[in-house]
Image (cartoon, rainbow, N blue to C red):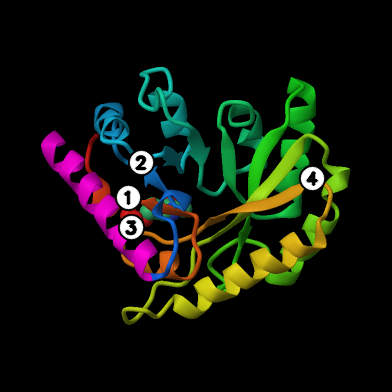
Amino acid sequence: MMQEIAERVANIRAEMEKAAREAGRDPSEILLCAATKMNDAARVRVAVEAGVDCCGENRVQELLEKLPQGAYDGKPLHFIGHLQTNKVRQVVGKVDLIQSVDRPELLQAIEKEAAKQGLVQRILLEVNIGAEASKSGFTPQGAMEIASRMAEFPHCHVEGLMAIPPISEEPGGNTKYFAQMRQLLVDIRAKKYDNVSMACLSMGMTDDFTDAIREGSTMIRVGTAIFGARQYGAAK
Ligand SMILES: *Cc1c(COP(=O)(O)O)cnc(C)c1O
């Protein structure tokens, strides 16, 4: 089982490298974030030791369980799930990057908590690029607008954008969304807003990360291809 995780990470690295080279990109520009939800600390450690670049956790509860167990030691920890404002204080300052800032109220809550803790929290703006009713996230215009106001949030720093496109019906189905995200990143970056760097474009998961890389992703978030299918409902 543990051997399997290490082998899978190596295989993903090879696929990442191939996709990058085909797109004329330097493979070292693209980071592999392990999406660790529903995997215990021991399994996360194996992925960390196999050389993923960072870990992304979805639920505050899981993060708080695995953190003291040393699950992520040695690699940056990101938060990638929907974050309730009443849990912000349990996440700010504990994670290197909050990828899933999906609404103005959450940004305000993070700003307030980061100010209280006296630190600057690195964040990504999550964009609902498929305009899906079931998903949270800024519209592309909303992301542009909030980026233009980041000087009002001095304890947050926007490093880039994150997206979870719709579940694709066919291979390559998300390519257009990835391309739109890339264009939005370029457009926001060109404005040179205060407190906004736009170096990171987090997109691509197990089923579509090679497409995402071809369209300019700088960070893929992969769960199933590293850990195997998640056992929903099973005891951990
Ligand atoms: C679970 C998850 C992933 C990884 O999904 P897989 O399809 O298992 O690779 C990526 N991003 C987010 C936000 C997730 O919740």
User: Of discs 2 and 3, which sits in the foreground?
Assistant: 3
Q: Quadrant of the C terminus?
A: top left
Give the residue at x 65% y 44%. Answer: 123
Label ID, residue 195: 4
Label ID, residue 36: 2
* Quadrant location, ligand no. 1: bottom left
The mark that comes first in sequence, 4 or 3, is 3
Q: Which residue is mark 3?
A: 16
Give the magenta-colored segment's residue range: 2-22
Disc 4 versus disc 1: distance between alpha carbons? 31 Å
User: Circles 2 and 1: CB distance less than 8 Å?
Assistant: yes
Question: In this rendering, would 116 be left or right of 100?
Answer: right
The mark that comes first in sequence, 4 or 1, is 4
The mark that comes first in sequence, 2 or 3, is 3
User: Of discs 4 and 3, which sits in the foreground?
Assistant: 3
The mark that comes first in sequence, 4 or 2, is 2
Look at the numbered disc 1 and say if its residue's Cβ is closer than 8 Å to ligand 1.
Answer: yes
Q: Quadrant of the N terminus?
A: top left
